[in-house]
């Protein structure tokens, strides 16, 4: 599916989504409950089978935003989709049932932001030790936070 | 005559395959290519489960990026993938330029491609050497191929040293262009070097492909299907070794890649040998691009903002951007959010090796322990980029 068709299908199938105009990738902002449904849609319908990355952004008082980037490697259609979890919220649907690449990416995102991915069977810290306290990429986490004592 | 010892009853082992052994491979394993720990679940010699532990080299680059200005960070960016510092720097600098809408002169774009392709050759040299050393004595004496490859890599590092003054982390790219122009005599030295390397590639191929053990250890080992490759998001030679004709230089050309003639090798088999074949072609295509640049390097300035040292010279507006470059290991991406200040609000580094390594738990089970080494080497992870 090419980019024009993809934009049209997103507009009809996901009326609640906000699609930004222009840009190298189709940028879509979704309501949080449609997160996994949209991923399923871009994979099956738009043909974006290539999973590039998943991460989050901490917008301080406005809460966390989860972002993912996928691509159709045949027609080079890129989709960047994101969702706001809401202030103080950390729960998000896992994309693991759709993309296997989401496994490590979501573990890293949990590690760094404390996002709890609902449906991820093995949500452990990815990069930091298991006994680490806090989630470093949150804006509230100071760079000079003392290292937890060695055991 | 010593007394006859009574025959001891032979204890029959009722081995039903339930006796599993857990083995730690790494983080201090010579073939782990850095600090990677694979917890292998073994049944005899066969791996039935694997849990990968990473993060030993984690420096939280993304937090660092939020605390360093757009001008300071590029020299740190090169420390993500330190084997291909040129391309990781480029990803960050391109993201900043895209956000700040900075023009890059043609000559600077060509120089960027020139160093990126030389870096690809140097990085593939290191991959071939270490991979063959991992597979060890069967390939004609342990470190032979390794030492040959390092010898060639040194020649390219000499070129980089003449160009930038550094051999590992270069600081070559800057916002708006590149920092150094080619010194006198450099182009001739470069031509000589790539001619030599191209010639020696034939020697390596002869050394390896005429060795039956090399075929035994690589063919049909560690097969990644096209479906799995895209689903996990692996990139570069791994993706193309799995039958996906996808190269960012072709799909989304950046830095004037559309000006050059090159082939994108694709192998459908998806095994270690296919990945080897893809990389051997990439060596030659990189050399081909380098020749085209040396032949047709345009005159002009090398930077639109010479001597960018303080962040006051770069105004980055609010906005977000995701730029990607085709590194030697695949897609190196930088997702940047600017808030109008001198530092990025958020930077996400999409390391090629992180995604490439994530495929290991899917492909290792079913192989023997010796194959784990061959598969891990064929993935070519650089742990600075995995752990960031």
Image: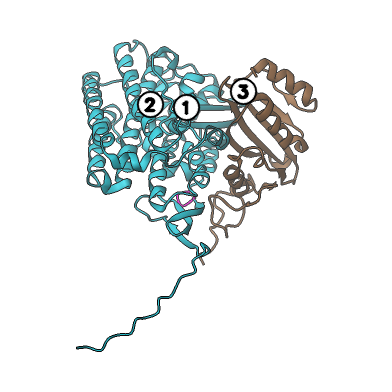
**10 Å crowding of disc 3: few (<14), some (14-19), many (20+):** many
| Residues shaded magenta | B54-58
Chain of residue at mark 1: B
Mark 2 lies on residue: B116
Measuring from the top left, give residue A27's x and y in whole percent: 67, 25
Which chain is cyan in the rendering? B
Name the side, left or right, on which B271 lies relative to B359: left
Mark 1 lies on residue: B325
Chain of residue at mark 2: B
Measuring from the top left, give residue B97's x and y in whole percent: 51, 23
- Verify CB contact (< 8 Å) between mark 1 and mark 2: yes
Measuring from the top left, give residue B339's x and y in whole percent: 62, 31
Residue B16 shows in this picture: yes
Name the side, left or right, on which B336 lies relative to A36: left
Mostly what secondary structure, the magenta segment? loop
Helix, strand or loop at label 2? It is helix
For this rendering, which residue is in front, B356 or B253?
A: B356
Q: Residue at x 78, y 25 (%)?
A: A13
Name the side, left or right, on which B240 lies relative to B191: right
Q: Residue at x 42, y 39 (%)?
A: B220
Q: Which mark is residue A25?
A: 3
Q: Residue at x 32, y 19 (%)?
A: B288
Residues behind callouts 1 and 2 on a single chain:
yes
Q: Residue at x 27, y 32 (%)?
A: B205
Q: Which mark is residue B56?
A: none
Is residue A123 on the magenta stretch? no
């Amino acid at each position: 599916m090419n980019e024009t068709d993809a934009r049209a299908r997103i507009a009809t199938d996901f009326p609640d989504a906000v699609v930004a105009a222009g840009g190298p990738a189709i940028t879509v902002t979704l309501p949080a409950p449609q997160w996994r449904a949209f991923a399923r849609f871009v994979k099956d319908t738009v043909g974006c089978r290539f999973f590039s990355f998943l991460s989050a952004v901490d917008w301080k008082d406005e809460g966390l935003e989860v972002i993912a980037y996928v691509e159709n490697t045949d027609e080079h259609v890129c989709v960047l989709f994101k969702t706001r979890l809401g202030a103080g919220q950390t729960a998000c649907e896992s994309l693991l049932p759709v993309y296997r690449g989401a496994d490590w990416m979501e573990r890293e995102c949990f590690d760094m932001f404390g996002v709890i991915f609902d449906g991820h069977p093995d949500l452990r810290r990815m990069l930091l030790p298991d006994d680490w306290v806090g989630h470093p990429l949150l804006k509230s986490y100071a760079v000079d936070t003392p290292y937890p004592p060695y055991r | 005559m010593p007394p006859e010892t009574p025959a001891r009853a032979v204890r029959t082992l009722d081995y039903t395959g339930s006796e599993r052994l857990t083995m730690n491979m790494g983080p201090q394993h010579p073939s782990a290519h850095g600090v990677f720990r694979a917890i292998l679940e073994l049944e005899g010699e066969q791996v039935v489960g694997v849990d990968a532990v990473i993060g030993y080299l984690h420096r939280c680059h993304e937090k660092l990026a939020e605390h360093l200005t757009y001008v300071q960070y590029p020299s740190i960016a090169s420390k993500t993938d330190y084997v291909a510092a040129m391309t990781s720097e480029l990803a960050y600098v391109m993201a900043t330029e895209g956000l700040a809408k900075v023009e890059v002169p043609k000559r600077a774009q060509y120089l960027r491609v020139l160093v990126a392709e030389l870096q690809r050759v140097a990085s593939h040299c290191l991959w071939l050497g270490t991979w063959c050393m991992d597979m060890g004595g069967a390939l004609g004496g342990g470190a032979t191929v390794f030492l040959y490859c390092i010898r060639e890599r040194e020649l390219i590092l000499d070129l980089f040293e003449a160009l930038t003054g550094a051999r590992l982390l270069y600081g070559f790219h800057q916002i708006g262009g590149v920092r150094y122009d080619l010194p006198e005599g450099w182009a001739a030295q470069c031509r000589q070097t790539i001619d030599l390397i191209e010639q020696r590639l034939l020697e390596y191929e002869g050394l390896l492909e005429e060795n039956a053990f090399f075929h035994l250890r690589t063919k049909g080992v560690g097969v990644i299907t096209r479906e799995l490759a895209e689903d996990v998001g692996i990139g570069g030679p791994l993706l193309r070794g799995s039958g996906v004709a996808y190269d960012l230089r072709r799909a989304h050309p950046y830095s004037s890649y559309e000006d050059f003639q090159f082939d994108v090798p694709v192998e459908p088999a998806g095994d270690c040998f296919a990945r080897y074949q893809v990389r051997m072609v990439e060596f030659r295509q990189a050399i081909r691009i380098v020749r085209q640049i040396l032949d047709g390097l345009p005159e002009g300035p090398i930077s639109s903002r010479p001597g960018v040292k303080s962040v006051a010279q770069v105004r980055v507006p609010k906005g977000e951007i995701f730029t990607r470059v085709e590194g030697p290991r695949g897609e190196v991406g930088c997702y940047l959010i600017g808030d109008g200040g001198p530092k990025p609000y958020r930077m996400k580094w999409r390391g090629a090796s992180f995604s490439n390594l994530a495929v290991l738990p899917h492909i290792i089970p079913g192989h023997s322990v010796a194959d784990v080494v061959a598969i891990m080497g064929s993935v070519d992870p650089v742990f600075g980029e995995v752990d960031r």
